[in-house]
Amino acid sequence: MASVCCVATAPVLAQPVSAWKAERNGVEIKVSALQRDQSAAFYQARGFSAETIAPYVAACGFAFELRNTGKGMVRLRLSDWHAIGKAGSARFMLPEAWDAEWERRGAPESARIAFRWAQFPAEQEFAPGDWIMGMATLDRRLAGPLRLTLRFSNQQRQHEIVIDNVTCAP
């Protein structure tokens, strides 16, 4: 059975909050909403046309920074993470699914390589002190405040970090 983290709640402000932090069982995470114009500029500068990258830019995306602050190995799978909002739930798109979309749309291989390097990995195992950064999008855009559930394991135990009031960038 997974242990559940105390819920990190962002304050309600007049403007959307764009970064949230939480820590649980030797894992620190920072989540930032990806702004559409920044995502478009980032990927167009790496060889994507505006038309090709449009579905990614339109998606609800986040940048993640995850740090192993514990004493053992941490393992995670992006497919175990999800978001829940008033309109239902969504899973995170795996980098391989986006890569298939880029191939279908004829994106240059150099752009696809840059994309893979910038994405949060589908699976990761890292030692104490290691950290990782990357971007990921939900498989569908959810409006309003979301609850992110981020599962991981360390020392053969399953854990979750739950972050409430996360929002997609407008």
Image: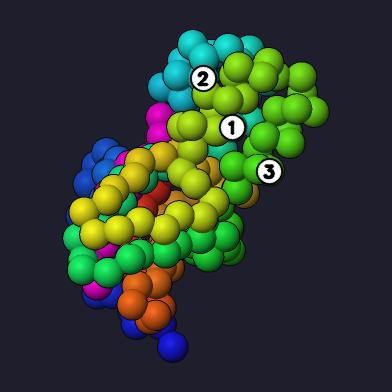
> SS for tag 3?
helix
Res. 39 visible in picture: yes
> SS for tag 1?
helix
> SS for tag 2?
helix
Q: Which amino acid type is shown beneath numbered disc 3?
A: Ala
* Residue 10 relative to residue 89: left or right: left
| Residue 75 magenta | no
Q: Badge 1 is on which residue?
A: 56
Q: Is the residue marked by circle 2 packed among few (<14), some (14-19), or many (20+) residues within 10 Å?
A: many
Asked whether the beta carbons under mark 2 and mark 3 sit within 8 Å of each other, the answer is no
Tell me residue 117's x, y (percent). 49, 31
Q: Main secondary structure of the magenta part?
A: strand
Looking at marks 2 and 3 on the same chain, the residue that comes earlier in the sequence is marked by 2
Q: Badge 2 is on which residue?
A: 43
Q: Say if 153 sits above or below 166 in the image.
A: below
Q: Is the residue marked by circle 1 packed among few (<14), some (14-19), or many (20+) residues within 10 Å?
A: some
Quarter of the rendering occupied by the N terminus:
bottom left
* Residue 101 relative to residue 129: left or right: right
Image colouring: rainbow
Q: Is the residue marked by circle 3 packed among few (<14), some (14-19), or many (20+) residues within 10 Å?
A: few
Tell me residue 162's x, y (percent). 35, 67
Q: From the viewer's side, name the closer residue of 12 and 40.
A: 40
Res. 29 visible in picture: no
Looking at marks 2 and 1 on the same chain, the residue that comes earlier in the sequence is marked by 2
Q: Badge 3 is on which residue?
A: 97
Q: Say if 69 sits above or below 52 in the image.
A: below
